[in-house]
């Protein structure tokens, strides 16, 4: 494998493919319909929330790029995304797909979608010197495009869209440290660490303890 050029890691948000956003029966209400999870209602949604959901219904977006014009005509800045969206998106986390990409223009690396209602998905920073591996029972399945990772009892399914994500998963067949993985793979270290952070947060890995020092 040749070395892959560096790029910026992107954390994207979208709605599940089965989710449709429509006006509710009451004035100033939105309803998100999901075949899997049923309806979710949002009363008096902020303009920024409306715009974020509109874009997320179309596909993965960077939340920091979402802006909306409130009624008074003033424009939200970046801090509006941090202050207004989190509460609503956390509540809707089971309807949201989190996608990891990087700006090499070749498409997303992997995505994580809920299979049951659970807390908000938050990528987890992994210690560089702790051994981790795939959980026993994780099933790797060939999908229409790429692979899926499933585990009985897990709250999420992981979809691997590109070979680079599969490379990371392949090394997790045995206990390995993130530090050794970044050295072994021809990927920018930030990309390898980001893929790991999604896999850990999705419950697909287990901690095997600290790496023992070698003795002469």
Image (cartoon, grey):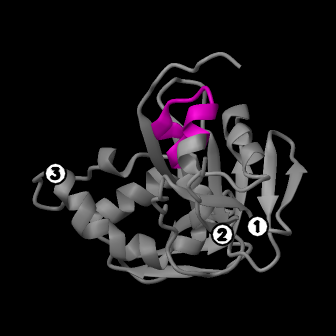
Residue that protrudes farthest toward the right in the picture: 142
Specify which label sits upstream in the sequence, 3 or 1. 3
* Residue 135 marker: 1
Residue that protrudes farthest toward the top in the picture: 2
Instruction: Give the quadrant of residue 130.
Output: bottom right
Q: Are marks 3 and 1 in contact (CB under 8 Å)?
A: no
Q: Which percent across, then down, holds residue 128? A: 48, 52
The residue that label 2 is drawn on is: 203
Tell me the mark number nearer the camera, choosing from 1 and 2: 1
Q: Which percent across, then down, holds residue 62? A: 40, 46
The residue that label 3 is drawn on is: 77
Specify which label sits upstream in the sequence, 1 or 2. 1
Along the viewing direction, whichever of 127 and 154 lies nearer the viewer: 127
Estimate the spatial distance between the alpha carbons at disc 3 and disc 1, rounded to whole Å. Answer: 42 Å
**Is residue 104 among what the camera can see?**
yes
Identify the residue at image location x=62%, y=59%.
131
Q: Are marks 3 and 2 in contact (CB under 8 Å)?
A: no
Identify the residue at image location x=80%, y=64%.
150
Q: Are marks 1 and 2 in contact (CB under 8 Å)?
A: yes
Q: Secondary structure at mark 1?
A: loop
Asked if 96 appears above or below 196 in the picture, the reply is below
Identify the residue at image location x=49%, y=61%.
123
Q: Secondary structure at mark 2?
A: loop
In this image, 106 relative to 43: left or right?
right
Q: Main secondary structure of the magenta part?
A: helix
| Magenta part of the chain | 181-194
Along the viewing direction, whichever of 214 and 91 lies nearer the viewer: 214
Specify whether residue 183 is painted magenta: yes
């Amino acid at each position: 494998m040749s070395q892959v050029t560096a790029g910026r890691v992107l954390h994207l948000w979208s709605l599940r493919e089965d989710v449709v956003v429509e006006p509710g029966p009451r004035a100033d209400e939105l309803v998100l319909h999901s075949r899997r999870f049923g309806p979710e209602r949002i009363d008096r949604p902020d303009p920024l929330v409306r715009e974020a959901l509109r874009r997320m219904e179309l596909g993965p977006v960077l939340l920091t790029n979402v802006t909306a014009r409130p009624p008074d005509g003033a424009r939200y800045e970046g801090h509006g995304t941090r202050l207004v969206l989190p509460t609503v998106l956390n509540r809707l986390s089971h309807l949201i797909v989190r996608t990891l990409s990087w700006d090499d223009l070749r498409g997303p690396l992997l995505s994580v979608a809920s299979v049951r209602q659970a807390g908000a998905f938050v990528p987890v920073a992994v210690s560089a010197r702790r051994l981790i591996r795939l959980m026993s029972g994780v099933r790797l399945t060939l999908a229409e495009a790429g692979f899926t990772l499933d585990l009985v009892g897990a709250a999420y399914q992981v979809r691997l869209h590109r070979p680079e994500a599969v490379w990371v998963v392949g090394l997790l067949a045995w206990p390995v440290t993130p530090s050794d993985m970044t050295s072994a793979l021809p990927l920018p270290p930030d990309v390898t660490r980001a893929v790991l952070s999604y896999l850990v947060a999705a419950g697909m890995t287990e901690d095997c303890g600290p790496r023992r020092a070698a003795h002469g």
